[in-house]
Amino acid sequence: MDIPEYILNSKNSLVVCPEDEFQLVQESIKKPSIPIKTQEHLVDISPESIESVFVYYPKKALTNNLVSELVNISKPGSKLFIQSDPAELEFLLKVNGFVNLDKENVYITCEKPTYQLGSTAKISNKNVASVWKIDDDNEDELIDSDELLDEHDLERPAPNTLKVCGTTGKRKACKDCSCGLAEELASEVKPGNVVDTTALPKSSCGSCYLGDAFRCASCPYLGMPAFKPGEKIQLTDNQLISDL
């Protein structure tokens, strides 16, 4: 096993390997000053204290927990050398924050960013207007907003349709309406038959009043709108036309 020269020459480096590879790695390192750790012992290392790391996992793929630990112990700007199963290795390193991924011989290299989590940087506000400037030489045709509207969209609404109830906030009269909206809405209803539900059979299931979706096939209220017991129902002309 060849240890990268960068690791051997670094002042504060670390080698990480699985438990079953520990003996092999220990025999391969000629500098006893370089510590060797398994994943279980990475929690003992101070955060952001290691300048370079060599990860030797040739027969196994790195896990997200291991890479997260490597991010924690590495100094900003430190370099990481990895010899591992390459399955999803690039994705795993990037989502944990490592940058500048590259390949050197049999190793994958990457770096921890020089900025720290939670750090801020001031963005210059110079030439902000040019960012939103439209290129006049662009050959793409722009949509004419006037073509999106037709004559109906440009018509002014009738004033009487804009009146709403001060209590409900809608074009629906409240129970104790005194502003005239109730009378106005009543005059807008098309003439039709008035059904007095007090003369109809009483509901035994309690669902007849809720509408056709809750009524059975033999319900005497079938075809009528939902109502309250004893309420008079105004049927419009459309509701008087049979669907059959």
Image: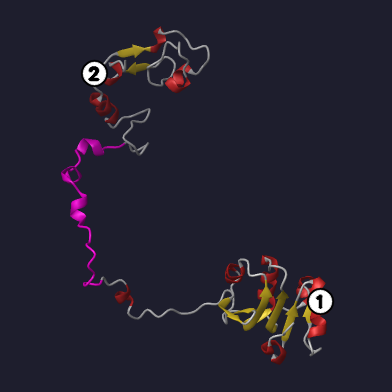
Q: Position of residue 91 (x, y in %)?
A: 58, 68
Secondary structure category for the residue under label 2: loop
Q: Quadrant of residue 235?
A: top left
Type of amino acid at the residue the image marks with label 1: Phe
Q: Position of residue 135 (x, y in %)?
A: 25, 72
Give the label on residue 22, or none: 1
Asked whether residue 141 appears in the rendered view, the answer is yes
Q: Which of these two is toward me, 242 or 188?
A: 242
**Does residue 157 show up magenta in the picture?**
yes
Is 157 placed left or right of 175 in the picture? left
- Region of the chain picked out in magenta, as a range: 135-164
On the image, numbered disc 2 is attached to which residue?
A: 191
The disc label shown at residue 244, or none: none
* Image quadrant in which the C terminus is located: top left
How crowded pointer 1 is (Cα within 10 Å; few <14, some 14-19, many 20+) is rated as some
Q: How far is disc 1 from disc 2 in space, using C-alphas?
A: 92 Å
Q: Measured from the top left, where is residue 242 in percent x and y?
A: 30, 15
Q: Determine if residue 11 is in view.
A: no
